[in-house]
């Protein structure tokens, strides 16, 4: 007789262990699929929004293997390496104009911390006292103390509130409330350090979409008041919204751009914060007190950078834009049957992302139905992880029409069971 395995010592992120005692053991991944110990799962959320082309894209995996044979890790202060140099140059060719410097880190949260510190450092080093940060209601920018401060407050942040810094909070520009938000921004922007936004779609806030016109107007107010615009494209970057970057749809050039998740195709942790020459120049001096004081041990890890270099090559050499466009169309087709379904509200799509709200008695992130839905989908071979009662589909670009049918058939079935 074998004795039962002792409980796992692993503490999982955003997981209430009393409700989810056992994590699913994943053995391998390929394309849009994960192989678990219990069977296959279609990855309908790109493994938490990171996987772009599909799991284990051959060119990215090949690059990782090759780099691992040459250089694993090296200090990045005073040293550099070819993968980091190549990725920085390649990024500057595809990001909105005006950005000229690339600061690496290793997660989206860190890329946002770096952005906030760049903004504050810029104003300090140019002799101004502009420290106020402006952010949107329902925003999400990460889970570190600084990024939580910029993000929406709620059940996620309650325990930490005493340590969070104040920001000016603008109403979310839902249809009909755009002018109200812009008016408040006009008032708040004078003398502020920066406005931080997730361009066009607020991810963790519930896949809330707003128009490129609003983003363009926000950018114009920033330009008029000198307030720096930080675009957090950690989630929206690399094709999710239908264009390479969401800012592109509004023809907006942010002062600071945060990239993470899809930067390496989702294969390895890597992030980058890009800024323009003015911000770099404000820190450029023989006076060492003006140094940009930020680093993490694994800044620009060579293997992660090699993966990102391969990812950028995939974007150049493969018809990724066509794939994104085709996926967006397939997603729109599949939403059609839900548009008049009274059990749903807010049926919406931006690029390759769709979302719909299941009508329940306790809507919101803590809606009881969230866990039930996750379980229900997993039993049907699908990895979907609703945000409360908001079901969203954010698949890797290799997903096929037949695979999407599996997803939406299950969503329809779920409505029959839980609405
Ligand atoms: C995921 C995300 C982050 C945080 O990225 P991590 O790599 O999880 O730290 C920040 N901003 C946005 C908009 C995100 O979607």
Image: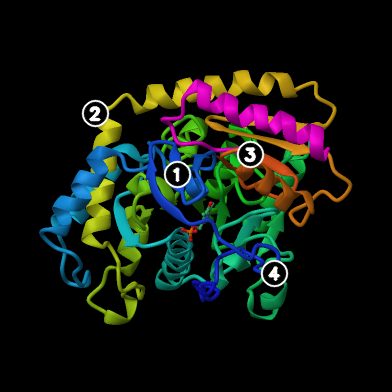
For residue 18, the mark is: 4
The x, y position of residue 84, in whole percent, is 21, 55
Q: Secondary structure at mark 1?
A: strand
**Left of 146 or right of it: where is 158?**
right
Front position in the image: 166 or 280: 166
Q: Which residue is mark 3?
A: 392
Is the Cβ of the residue at disc 4 closer than 8 Å to that at disc 3? no
The x, y position of residue 173, in whole percent, is 71, 42
Q: Secondary structure at mark 2?
A: helix
Distance of label 4 from label 2 (alpha carbons):
47 Å
Image point (17%, 72%), residue name: 78
Q: Where is 339 relative to 118, above or below?
A: above
Q: Where is 49 relative to 153, above or below?
A: above
Q: Secondary structure at mark 4?
A: loop
The magenta segment: 392-419
Q: Is residue 314 magenta?
A: no
């Amino acid at each position: 007789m074998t004795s039962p395995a002792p409980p796992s010592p692993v503490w999982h992120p955003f997981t209430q262990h009393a409700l989810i005692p056992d994590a699913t053991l994943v053995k391998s991944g390929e394309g849009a699929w994960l192989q678990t110990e219990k069977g296959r799962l279609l990855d309908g959320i790109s493994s938490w929004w990171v996987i772009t082309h599909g799991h284990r894209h051959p060119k990215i995996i090949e690059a990782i293997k090759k780099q691992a044979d040459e250089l694993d890790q090296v200090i990045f202060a005073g040293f550099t390496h070819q993968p980091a140099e190549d990725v920085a140059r390649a990024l500057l060719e595809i990001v909105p104009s005006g950005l000229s410097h690339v600061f690496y880190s290793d997660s989206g949260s860190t890329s946002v911390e770096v952005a906030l510190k760049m903004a504050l450092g810029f104003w300090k080093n140019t002799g101004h006292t502009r420290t106020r940060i402006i952010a949107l209601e329902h925003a999400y920018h990460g889970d570190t103390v600084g990024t939580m401060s910029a993000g929406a407050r709620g059940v996620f942040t309650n325990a930490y509130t005493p340590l969070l810094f104040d920001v000016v909070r603008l109403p979310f520009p839902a249809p009909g409330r755009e002018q109200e938000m812009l008016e408040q921004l006009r008032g708040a922007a004078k003398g502020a350090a920066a406005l931080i936004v997730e361009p066009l779609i607020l991810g963790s806030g519930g896949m809330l979409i707003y128009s490129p016109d609003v983003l363009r107007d926000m950018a114009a107010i920033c330009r008029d008041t000198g307030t720096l615009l930080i675009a957090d494209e950690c989630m929206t970057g690399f094709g999710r919204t239908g264009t390479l970057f969401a800012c592109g749809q509004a023809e907006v050039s942010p002062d600071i751009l945060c990239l993470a998740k899809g930067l390496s195709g989702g294969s390895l942790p890597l992030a980058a914060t890009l800024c323009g020459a003015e911000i770099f120049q404000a820190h450029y001096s023989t006076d060492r007190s003006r140094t940009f004081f930020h680093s993490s041990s694994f800044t620009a890890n060579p293997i992660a950078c090699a993966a990102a270099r391969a990812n950028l090559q995939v974007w150049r050499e493969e018809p990724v834009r066509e794939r994104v466009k085709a996926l967006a169309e397939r997603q729109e087709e599949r939403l059609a049957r839900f548009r008049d379904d009274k059990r749903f509200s807010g049926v919406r799509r931006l690029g390759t992302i769709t979302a719909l709200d299941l009508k329940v008695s306790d809507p919101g992130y803590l809606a009881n139905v969230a866990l039930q839905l996750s379980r229900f989908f997993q039993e049907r071979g699908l990895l979907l992880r609703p945000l409360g009662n908001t079901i969203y589909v954010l698949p890797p670009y290799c997903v096929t029409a037949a695979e999407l049918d599996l997803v939406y058939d299950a969503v329809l079935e779920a409505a029959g069971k839980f609405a």
